[in-house]
Every structure is written in C-alpha cells, then in structure tokens.
C-alpha cells in the first residue's frame, strides 16, 4: 500500500497556485472614450487606453453637409484608433483609422458630402495603449 506523502501534496498545491496567479489578467485592460466638447456645432473628445478595447457612438447635430475632422494619437505604441462618421441618412462619410505602431499618428480633412441633420460618430479603440483626441466641426 502506498503511503500519502504530504510534501508532494503541498508542492502540488503551490505549483498550481503559481500557475493560476501567473496567467494574464484581462481585467487590468481598459479603454475609455469621453466627449469633452458639445454635441451641436463642434464635438470633441479624448480617448485613453491601457491595452483595452471599447467603442462609443455619439449623436451629433450637423446643420451642414460636410464636417471638418481631426484626430491625434499622442502616445500609443500599440493598438488601433478608428473614427466613423455617418450622416442623417446613415451613409458613411468618413471611416479612418490610426495604427499605433506606424506613422502617421494624426489625420485631418473634410468628410464626403452627406445629408444635414443628426449624424452619428463612432470612436473605436482596440488593444489601445496611450491617449489621444478627436474633433469634428460643421463643414461648408
């Protein structure tokens, strides 16, 4: 008959505990998008991330048919930032992104022409590490 060896049992528990605690913890990953400037006329915001992923959609009243846009990653060695803008009829007028591992780290311009009214703006950050900002203003 085999005898129970407490030393092997205790070592097994210690090894199992170490393996469980050394696994990556996705709960530490975070990302956040915040509107810092109105939802009529001009809209702007900030985004931050610690390796996390999030997507936020905002309604924006644009009385004109285009919008001026700008986005900038101020510190992002990894991850992706994406801005999607749709007009009041749901037509995509802008779909641009910045990849944290390559240049450029900014973009700006004017959207395609669309229908005035309530537009939607979707900001997505994926596996994002760093921070940045974006703005939209009524075009011409």
Image (spheres, helix red, strand yellow):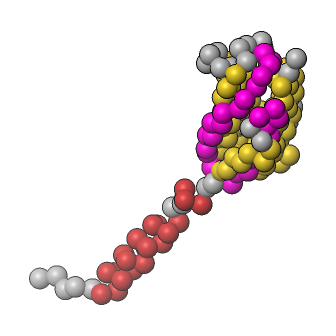
- In the image, residue 80 lies at what x, y percent? 70, 37
Count numbered badges in the picture. 0
Q: Residue at x 71, y 32 (%)?
A: 60
Q: Residue at x 66, y 36 (%)?
A: 58
- In the image, residue 6 lies at what x, y percent? 30, 87
Residue 69 picture quarter:
top right
Q: Residue at x 27, y 86 (%)?
A: 5
Viewport quadrant of the C terminus: top right
Which residue, as the protein is rendered here, is positioned at the far left?
1
Residue 117 seen from this side: yes
Q: Is residue 31 left or right of residue 4?
A: right
- In the image, residue 43 lies at what x, y percent? 79, 37
Where 140 falls versus 15 (above or below)? above
Where 7 falls versus 18 (above or below)? below
Query: From which residue to which does the magenta span run?
Result: 40-66
Residue 136 picture quarter:
top right
- In the image, residue 75 lies at what x, y percent? 83, 48
Viewport quadrant of the N terminus: bottom left
Q: Is residue 138 left or right of residue 82?
A: right
Q: Is 38 or 73 nearer to us in this picture? A: 38
Question: Does the magenta portion include 3?
Answer: no
Residue 99 picture quarter:
top right
Residue 102 seen from this side: no
Q: Residue at x 46, y 67 (%)?
A: 19
Q: Is residue 125 left or right of residue 131?
A: left
Magenta stretch: dominant SS? Answer: strand
Question: Does the magenta portion include 47?
Answer: yes
Q: Is 108 or 118 nearer to us in this picture? A: 118
């Amino acid at each position: 008959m085999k005898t129970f060896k407490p030393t092997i049992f205790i070592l097994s528990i210690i090894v199992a505990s170490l393996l469980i605690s050394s696994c990556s913890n996705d709960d530490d990953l975070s990302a956040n998008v915040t509107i810092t400037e109105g939802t009529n006329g001009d809209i702007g915001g900030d985004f931050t991330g610690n390796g996390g992923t999030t997507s936020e959609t905002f309604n924006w009243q644009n009385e004109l048919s285009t919008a001026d846009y700008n986005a900038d990653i101020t510190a992002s060695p990894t991850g992706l930032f994406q801005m999607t803008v749709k007009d009041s009829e749901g037509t995509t007028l802008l779909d641009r992104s910045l990849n944290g591992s390559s240049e450029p780290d900014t973009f700006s311009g004017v959207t395609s022409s669309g229908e005035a009214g309530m537009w939607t703006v979707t900001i997505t950050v994926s596996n994002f590490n760093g921070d940045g900002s974006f703005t939209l203003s009524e075009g011409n």
